[in-house]
Image (cartoon, helix red, strand yellow):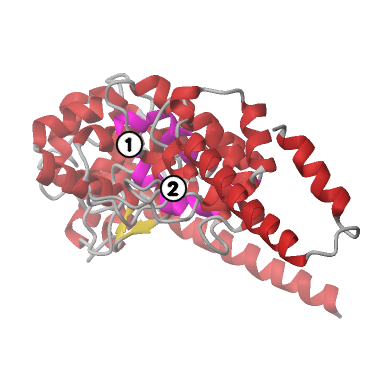
Amino acid sequence: MDLNVAMDTVINLEGKLNDQAFFDDINKFARTMMNGFTQATGKALHRLKKSKPSEDTVKQMVEGIPYSLTYKRAANQRLPIQSAVWDTDSIKYLPILAKEGIKHNVGGRDKRGGLLAVVPSGNDHNYWNTLQLLASAPDPSNVIPFDTACLNAMKELRKAGLLVKTDIKYLLCLACHPAARMRFEYLAGWDSDSLMARTHKGLPYAHHIIKYESLASFTMYLRASLKYYPRQIGCLFLKDNDGKTAIKRAIKNHGRDKTFKAIQECIPTDTTLPILHHAAKNAPEYFNEFSVRYPSAIYLRDENGRSFKQVKLAASTYESDCLFFLTLSDDEIAEVDPVTKQYPFLTAATAGTGNLLTAYFLLSKNPSLLDRYREQVTRERTEEQEGASTKKRARE
């Protein structure tokens, strides 16, 4: 018997055959048949990694039998979109499944077609959703192809508005491991502010990575932060709420030698970044280690135009350096700090708790600086008064 002929016959009998029981039986058989179509198609969607159909074919399947998207695999109760996230050959179908799934609330309301539905799992990650797995899942035996496939799927989801910038705060830390390098770099580039500004479990992202992940993950994070925040030396001296720097936490967790080796992988010895300035200001306890590895950085200026010695003087971290003042040249003693607009003797007197003996020593090397400072203050006050008078006349 031809099924198409049978269906046409039933349709033609409607309105002609006065036998409701017949039509009730046909409807019952039709529902059974539709359930069979849905089940068969759902199973096929779970086998995409093996069958490898074209994307147009998958689109045709889910558009024609949309409820197949909700068919859960008996073995693990995963949706088809969740089965697709685990294999290089099936990840490319994930955007198609999500786009169609959102029309039918797959995974529940506001779950983006199953992207935000929790993935049933017997391991510690049973609270992760499909999108989180897409951004972070590894395939140790097929690292680059798998990472590439996941990244391409993420780009397609972004184009469709199914991956949005606010998702990054839930994905960046998860993606920070070597097997998800391309995905991590993509997310970091999309929202570079998150690298320095976001927190996770009460810690800045960088500190969270150091505390809970491998040294390789921290190296990845440091390299990314250096790309977008080079003058701050990336996240290396980023502080947590207790004032602990990232480098201090890294040394505690991974050891001094391994940490500095990782830093040197990201920052070459001949760097043009003012790394010693930041070390002197934010991590003076490790300054010797930095100075041995980056000796030429002592001649650089920081992002504010300050010399290394100006930074060290302003931060009051010179006490342990008995030769600091003896090595100051006449030009350095007479140079105005570009940030405070003060001569070194004034910076010594006002920075931190102040050191009048140091200020006197510096002033004794060039007493004329006091007269220059008086002239500078007088000039600035005169300019302020003239400016205030001009504004007053303009108002009148």
Q: Is residue 378 inside the magenta stretch?
A: no
- Identity, as a three-letter code, of the amino acid under mark 1: Leu
Residue span colored magenta = 161-188
Write down the quadrant of residue 260 in the picture: top left
Predominant secondary structure, magenta span: helix
Asked whether 181 falls inside the magenta stretch, the response is yes
* Residue at the outermost bottom position: 396
Q: What x and y, as percent, mark residue 53?
A: 57, 23
The number of discs equals 2
Q: Residues within 10 Å of mark 2 (few under 14, many from 20)?
A: many
In this view, the residue farthest toward the right is: 16
Amino acid marked by disc 2: Thr
Can residue 306 be seen here? no
The residue shown at (61%, 32%) is: 58
The numbered mark at residue 248 is none
Q: Which mark is residue 130?
A: 2
Instruction: Report the residue at 24% width, 25% height from top.
Output: 264
Q: Quadrant of the C terminus?
A: bottom right
Secondary structure state at the residue bearing disc 1: helix
Marks 2/1 in contact by CB < 8 Å: the verdict is no
280 lies above or below 299: below
Residue 147 percent across, percent down from the top left: 41, 27
Q: Earlier in the sequence, mark 2 or mark 1?
A: 2
Is 298 positioned to the left or the right of 152 in the image?
Answer: left
Where is mark 1, residue-wise? 222
Image-based side of 323 in relation to 27, left or right: left
**Which quadrant of the figure has residue 378?**
bottom right
Spot occupied by residue 49 in the image (x, y as percentages of width and height)? 45, 27
Q: Residue at x 90, y 60 (%)?
A: 15
